[in-house]
Amino acid sequence: MSEAEIVEARDDAPLSTAKDRAGQQAATESLIDAKGDHVVGRAVTINRPPAELYAYFRDFARLPTFMENVERIDVLDAARSHWVVKAPGGRTVEWDARITEEREGEVIAWTTEEGADVADSGRIEFRDAGARGTVVVATIAYDPPAGTIGKIVAKLFQREPAIQARRDLRRFKQLMETGEIATSSRTKAQLQEEKA
């Protein structure tokens, strides 16, 4: 076995986390009805069984509990939902999404419907990691509003999907393992109450 084959055999990182274009292309090909030229891949290991994490995530109305920029998700039917998400400059963007693939306890994939403010598609996988729990893998393909300039502005305001995916998965891990999300010693609401 060559050195490259040995390294490849040990590397269990998801393709979507690859830094090279080939890995990102392979990850994009795993998306059904892929939309978006920018690919983000993140993974986290959560000390909970896959079925429990899948069930929490599948209840889309609960996602704003750990997704910082998601204001709300309205469930339209079993396969469609309406998302309202914070954008830079105090704006919000909205879109309807539909599920394109679903396997109970394993995977949920989606894509945006026509007319979305942000065209995107994605996939969340829940992989059994034995005694360690579950590896949750998020792959998101998206086109930022206003192209590259929009991506730079979103990054400045900490609203860029690559940044948010990492933070949201970290908060999901905290919520699922401890029942709460760690915050700073004082929240914005507490600071406002002190000023009043």
Image (cartoon, rainbow, N blue to C red):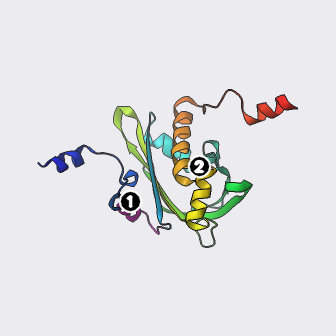
- The residue positioned farthest toward the top in the image shown: 185
Within-10-Å neighbours for mark 1: few <14, some 14–19, many 20+: many
Which quadrant is home to the C terminus?
A: top right
Residue 168 locus on image (x, y percent) = 55, 44
Q: Is residue 172 magenta?
A: no
Question: The residue under label 2 is which amino acid type?
Answer: Asp
Q: Which residue is mark 1?
A: 24
Q: Quadrant of residue 150?
A: bottom right
Residue 6 locus on image (x, y percent) = 18, 45
Q: CA distance from mark 1 to mark 2?
A: 28 Å
In the image, which residues are magenta? 24-34
For image coordinates 78% across by 31% down, the residue present is 191
For image coordinates 67% across by 55% down, the residue present is 88
Q: How many marks?
A: 2
From the image, state whether disc 1 or disc 2 is nearer to you. Answer: 1
Q: Which residue is mark 2?
A: 59
In this rendering, the answer to whether 56 lies above or below 95 is above
Could you say which is closer to the camera, residue 15 or residue 162? 162
Asked if residue 79 lies left or right of residue 83, the reply is left
Sequence-wise first label, 1 or 2: 1
Could you say whether the residue bearing mark 2 is in a helix, strand or loop? Answer: loop
Residue 136 locus on image (x, y percent) = 44, 45
Asked if residue 87 lies left or right of residue 8, the reply is right
Question: The residue under label 1 is which amino acid type?
Answer: Gln
Could you say which is closer to the camera, residue 117 or residue 22? 22
Asked if residue 13 lies left or right of residue 83, the reply is left
Could you say which is closer to the camera, residue 102 or residue 85? 85
